[in-house]
Image: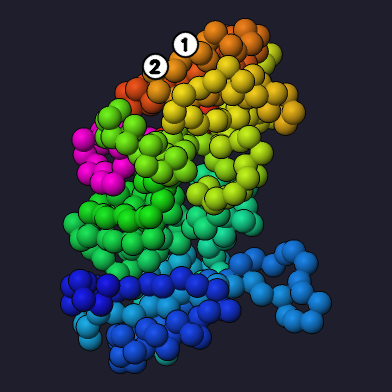
Amino acid sequence: MRRVLKDTASIYLHCDPTASHYLKLLMDAIYTRKLFRNEIIWAYPPGGKGPKFAFHRKHDVILYFSNSAKPTFNRQFTPLSDYAISKFTKVDEDGRKYKEYRNTTRTYLEDVPGRPVPSVWVDIHSLGQTISSERLGYPTQKPLALMDRIIRASSNEGDTVLDPFCGCGTTVHAAESLGRKWIGIDISKFSTGLIRDRILHNFKYLNGEDIDLRGTPDSVAEARVLARQDPFEFEKWVCGYIGAEGMFREPGERGADGGVDGVLKFFPVREGVKVKPEYAIVQVKGGKVSPDAVKALHETVRRYEATAGVMVCFGDQLGTVENQRVKATFSDVWGSYPVIQGFSVESLLGDEQLDLPLYGYKRRGAMLGL
């Protein structure tokens, strides 16, 4: 980043206190100590049980360096407190509130943008502390408010924002909403699919052609190559594309999955009201689908008390799924849905939707209808 960033650019490195002192030394060596701007303390609200022999850790660290002596920086403000506003006790002939300093200097309330944001941030909660509609099931997901503040501070409209470890895409989401260009990079094909759908859902003026997606399948032929060369990456790509979360492991983590490659949450509407979330278990098959695999999916759905199961495979294998699946259905006020269904890679690439309740079906990075 030191080599490719513009002179007006800045870099923000998020870590926890177990690594921040080591990373600070590395950053000093690369950027020089003169380009160090702030150690930002991102503090969480109190709560939870602390360790037995230490103070309760309630913060992460963000190291902020610039790429030159004169970076882009727009000071950020938080709203004035009621107490600060109460100090503006005088009113001029136009009805504007103001206060005076030593009876000589007037300061108008309307001219005060707020309280400058310090290097300790206590007003932005982590997603772990709140029940948030932003959550996409990604373990390192950051709140939009955090990235919004950073992007506003160190860039202007039309500038380019780069996140080289973009996870589920919070940085690029914030950048798009603020009128910045953006580049997101992640090693996980789960992430790239999830980011694409998140952006397309939240910004209706964009379509698939507006996003230059590289390194993931763009056709059925490319999907077959990925499934043959790296079945695990193929599984992650499918789950990310349809918005499936991890259940027994984090998205992208290797290891035993208990027969569950992903989980799709939805909120059926019964008797005119939303009920508690239910879920469909997702299994991904990049090769031949055997009759036993379809029967095993039904057993997995039953064992984990899920509502439905989805077998994602290539179109030429859908016949096996249809012939072997149980024909039972479940319903809500909008209609009936199969307990077990097949969904082809061809349909996935065509942006078709699964036969599940749309009210709350997680698609394109958001809960539809909520």
Reply above or below: 166 against 77.
above
Separation of residues labelled 2 and 1 (CA atoms): 7 Å
Secondary structure beneath disc 2? Answer: helix
Residue 223 in the image, given as x and y percentages of width and height: 33, 33
**Magenta run includes residue 215:** yes
Front in this rendered view, residue 180 or 197: 197
Q: Which residue is mark 1?
A: 319
Q: Which residues are magenta?
A: 200-217
Q: Amino acid at mark 2?
A: Asp
Q: Which residue is mark 2?
A: 316
Q: Amino acid at mark 1?
A: Gly
Residue 230 in the image, given as x and y percentages of width and height: 41, 43
Residue 211 in the image, given as x and y percentages of width and height: 24, 42
Counting other residues with Cα less than 10 Å from the Cα at mark 2, is it few (<14), some (14-19), or many (20 or more)?
A: few
Counting other residues with Cα less than 10 Å from the Cα at mark 1, is it few (<14), some (14-19), or many (20 or more)?
A: few
Residue 316 in the image, given as x and y percentages of width and height: 39, 16
